[in-house]
Image (tube, coloured by chain):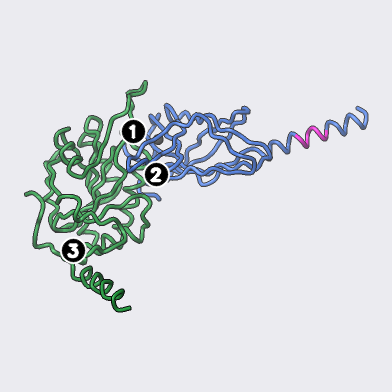
Amino acid sequence: MKRVVWPLVLALVLAACGDAPSPARLRDIGALLPPLTFTLHDGEARTRRAADFAGQVVVLYFGYTHCPDICPTTLARLAGLVRRLGAAAARVSILFVSVDPARDTPAVLHAYAEAFGPRVVALSGSQEQLGALARRYRVSYGLGPADGDGQYEVSHSSAVFIFDPRGRARLLATAEDSDADLLAGIQGLLAAGGNERWDGAR
Amino acid sequence: MNSAAKRLLLTLLACWQGVALAAPQVSDAWIRWLPGDLPLAGYLTLHNPDARPHTLVAVHSPLFRRIEIHRSLAQSGVARMQAVARLELRPQGQVSFSPGGYHLMLFGRAQALRQGQTVELLLQFDDGYQLRAPFAVRPATAR
Ligand SMILES: [Cu+2]
């Protein structure tokens, strides 16, 4: 009996003492993906870098504004959950990265982010800047053929990446994860603190 | 008119009314507002109280240049949309258009839309039946 129990106890102790215990039931990507690093621009055409968000839990999502269903549904959900954090919401930034810079000018990004409230920042960049960020988090995107009106669809990753205040990649969420798990994941990263350091690029 | 003809006429009338009562219905219809002239998604639940199927084939409104029936798909972590040419409602069945699934995709606003406003869309079925449905315009953050 003891031979069965001891490895289990050891595993529990190791899990509890680990440097970065996973706070929730979302997929732990701590060992899989590198710290947050990017150079993009926002709705005011200002350059924004990952280090600007040091000390914040960053919720990163790739999309495009001409996406009427999945993208706004995801942003509405994330913004609604973060609002439930009350005062702590100020320490969370939801970064919507448009992979469609041709249509998503800074003016479009500005109006779009505003529609989802103060915690959403809409960003985009050059193809090189977007490509570098997408490769870093192993996401793909692609432009579909244009229709008669010049409208086209953009296929994009449906994953939500969550970074801790040090910029470390920590959790991956999808539409299948519950509100409770997402909220617990973000709360866990906020409670873990670690605001004094930054692991991403400067 | 003799009584037999009268009876036949009444039966036909009742029958016709029965058909009209059994036509598809709409509930929970809303549009997610987005700024500018970005394409919008419309959501609703379609009910078919009839004993025979009805098929939605088109949606029109003078408020939009073009309306398509779409379905969102997430395949191996990639989000896409697919146009749906016809959507069959089974007898006594219902289909819900909801975030992340079926949606009406509304392209090209003819005039500005306000949150809180109600707009009418015309749903066209394969048997020629047309259904006028009011859609509430909700904020971007609606769920
Ligand atoms: Cu669509």
Tell me if label 3 and label 2 are in contact, CB under 8 Å.
Answer: no
Colour green, chain: A
Q: Is residue B143 magenta?
A: no
- Dot 3 alpha-carbon crowd within 10 angstroms: few under 14, some 14 to 19, many 20 or more: few
N-terminal of the two: label 2 or label 1?
A: 1
Q: Which residues are magenta?
A: B10-15
Residue A152 quadrant = top left
Q: CA distance from mark 3 to mark 2?
A: 44 Å
Mark 2, residue position: B115
- The secondary structure that most of the magenta stretch takes on is helix
Of residues A140 and B128, the one nearer the viewer is A140
Tell me if label 2 and label 1 are in contact, CB under 8 Å.
Answer: no
Comparing labels 3 and 2, the label whose residue is closer to the camera: 3
Q: Position of residue B23 (x, y in %)?
A: 64, 37
Q: Is residue A2 above or below residue B67?
A: below
Image quadrant for the N terminus of chain B? top right
Residue A48 quadrant = top left
Position of A141 with respect to B7 (left or right) is left
Q: Tell me which amino acid carries mark 3.
A: Ala
Q: CA distance from mark 2 to mark 1?
A: 14 Å
Q: Tell me which amino acid carries mark 1.
A: Asp
The picture's colour for chain B is: blue
Q: CA distance from mark 3 to mark 1?
A: 44 Å
Q: Which mark is residue A20?
A: 3
All told, the count of numbered labels is 3
- SS of the residue under disc 1: loop
Q: Are marks 2 and 1 on the same chain?
A: yes
Q: Position of residue A97 (x, y in %)?
A: 23, 42
- SS of the residue under disc 3: loop
Mark 1, residue position: B37
Q: Is residue A7 above or below residue B128?
A: below
